Image (cartoon, rainbow, N blue to C red):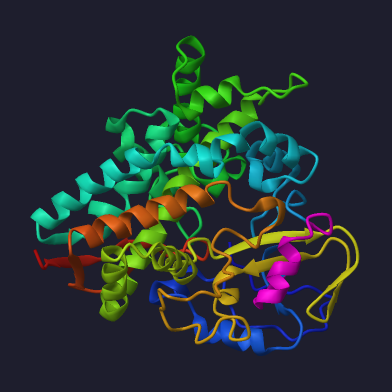
């Protein structure tokens, strides 16, 4: 979806290209983002439909995130490019809505993701984590993504949704194909999984979305007939005081969002976090010592640092609803603005020594879950719980990860993903 078109009106010089998925095969382009942060005002980026303004400074991303009236998530979509009206409606999920629709949808489902309700899944998360780590240690290591980072979050979210564990591999496969949709090409044909829908009407332009919709609807029908203590049952039964319920389209897009976000983003954090811990053994030793001493504060700060360091989702787009100003740049109504979270999470004016992985970092207002405001990620508490428990269980096993090769990165400008990374494991037991 990359274009060299330029808009006719920007007065700002064009900035460097940060949308080419191939750039991210070598990791996040930190030097490029640093140059963009140092440029006065927002940076203009040519792209499809004319282009967009890139926000890379922490303060600018925060301003945009917290003003949903001025910066819309619903106009044109949150993609880098605009969707046609029919595609926009077909693909609209919670993250692509504004108030009052966003308020209504969030009210129907938010209670399931409060810290109290997420906490009740702690034993489930710990049991899954322990099983995966025990096997990994027994094998002396392996591909960290395949053996731990991928199965952990998908098994957790599927358990919460009520999906049989034997279907986990299939949904991981679908999620991988969705990530492909954020790159330059896909490895599956448009009619894969029996899809007959135009790709432009499907999330990520991927036939895997059709498969995920079909799976979610089949599970919903089962739960309508036989309710269980799970999230899908809650979603099909969700009803507001005024009798409002989720429509069929809202349910399928929400199920799609929960599977993808509940899997891919935490998987990325766990993958990137493992690489950081292997590359910084002194920081891992701090975690081990903190666990032994019952130092919950450092465990919490380590979790937050992994989230900042990994920045699983690299950008989100907004569209201005009126004339406004960001970072000294005046924007007219209807202009696209893209928040680059990885750049903001390494802003030298906010984070001391931002390119140092520091598990004791206490001043850490990162944007791993977006920039706050109405669109703060619903799964933030769950992601934190999964990462914290993983660190605890690794420390309890006195296991140390050692890199056995270079990571294979996801060719995507949207997900900061790792496809595989070989590790060996050492224990002091």
- Say which quarter of the image contains residue 93: top right
> Residue at the location (55% across, 35% down)?
112
Q: Quadrant of the N terminus?
A: bottom right
Query: Total label count?
Result: 0
Tell whether position 67 is magenta: yes
> Residue at the location (34% across, 43% down)?
125
- Say which quarter of the image contains residue 155: top left
> Residue at the location (48% across, 41% down)?
118
Residue 167, position in %: x, y? 31, 32
Q: Is residue 409 in view?
A: no
Q: Is residue 403 left or right of residue 38?
A: left
Residue 36, position in %: x, y? 64, 84
Residue 295, position in %: x, y? 36, 65
Closest to the observer, 274 or 79: 274
Tell whether position 85 is magenta: no
Q: Quadrant of the C terminus?
A: bottom left
Identity of the residue furthest to the right in this view: 323
Closest to the observer, 54 or 269: 269
Q: Is residue 404 left or right of residue 280?
A: left
Q: Is residue 281 left or right of residue 94?
A: left
212 to 356, vertically: above or below: above
114 to 269, vertically: above or below: above
> Residue at the location (67% across, 64% down)?
48
320 to 360, vertically: above or below: above
Q: Which residues are magenta?
A: 53-71
């Amino acid at each position: 979806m990359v274009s060299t078109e330029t808009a006719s009106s920007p007065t700002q010089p064009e900035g460097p290209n940060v949308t080419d998925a191939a750039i991210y095969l070598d990791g996040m382009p930190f030097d490029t983002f640093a140059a963009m942060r140092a440029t006065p005002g927002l940076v203009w980026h040519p792209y499809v439909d004319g282009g967009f303004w890139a926000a890379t400074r922490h303060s600018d991303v925060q301003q945009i995130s917290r003003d949903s009236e001025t910066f819309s998530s619903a106009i044109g979509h949150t993609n880098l490019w605009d969707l046609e009206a029919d595609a926009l409606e077909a693909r609209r999920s919670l993250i692509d809505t504004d108030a009052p629709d966003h308020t209504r949808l969030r009210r129907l489902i938010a209670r399931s993701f409060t810290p109290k309700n997420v906490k009740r899944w702690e034993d489930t998360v710990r049991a899954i984590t322990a099983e995966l780590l025990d096997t990994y240690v027994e094998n002396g290591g392996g591909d960290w993504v395949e053996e731990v980072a991928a199965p952990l979050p998908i098994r957790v979210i599927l358990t919460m949704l009520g999906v049989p564990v034997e279907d986990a591999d299939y949904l991981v496969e679908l999620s991988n194909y969705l990530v492909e949709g954020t790159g330059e090409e896909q490895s599956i044909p448009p009619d894969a999984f029996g899809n007959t829908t135009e790709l432009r009407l499907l999330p990520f332009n991927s036939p895997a979305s059709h498969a995920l919709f079909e799976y979610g609807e089949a599970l919903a029908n089962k739960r309508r007939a036989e309710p269980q203590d799970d999230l899908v049952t809650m979603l099909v039964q969700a009803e507001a005081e005024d009798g409002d319920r989720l429509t069929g389209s809202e349910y399928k897009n929400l199920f799609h969002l929960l599977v993808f976000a509940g899997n891919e983003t935490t998987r990325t954090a766990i993958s990137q976090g493992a690489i950081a811990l292997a590359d910084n053994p002194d920081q891992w030793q701090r975690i081990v010592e903190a666990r032994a001493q019952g130092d919950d504060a450092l465990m919490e700060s380590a979790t937050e640092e992994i989230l900042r360091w990994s920045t699983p989702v690299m950008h989100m787009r907004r569209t201005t609803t009126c004339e406004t100003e960001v970072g000294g740049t005046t924007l007219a109504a209807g202009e696209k603005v893209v928040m680059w979270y990885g750049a903001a999470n390494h802003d030298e004016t906010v984070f001391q020594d931002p390119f140092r992985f520091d598990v004791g970092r206490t001043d850490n207002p990162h944007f791993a879950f977006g920039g706050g405001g109405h669109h703060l990620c619903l799964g933030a508490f769950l992601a934190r719980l999964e990462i914290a428990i993983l660190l605890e269980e690794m420390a309890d096993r006195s296991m140390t990860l050692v890199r056995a090769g270079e990571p294979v990165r996801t060719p995507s400008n949207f997900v900061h993903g790792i496809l595989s990374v070989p590790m060996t494991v050492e224990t002091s037991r």
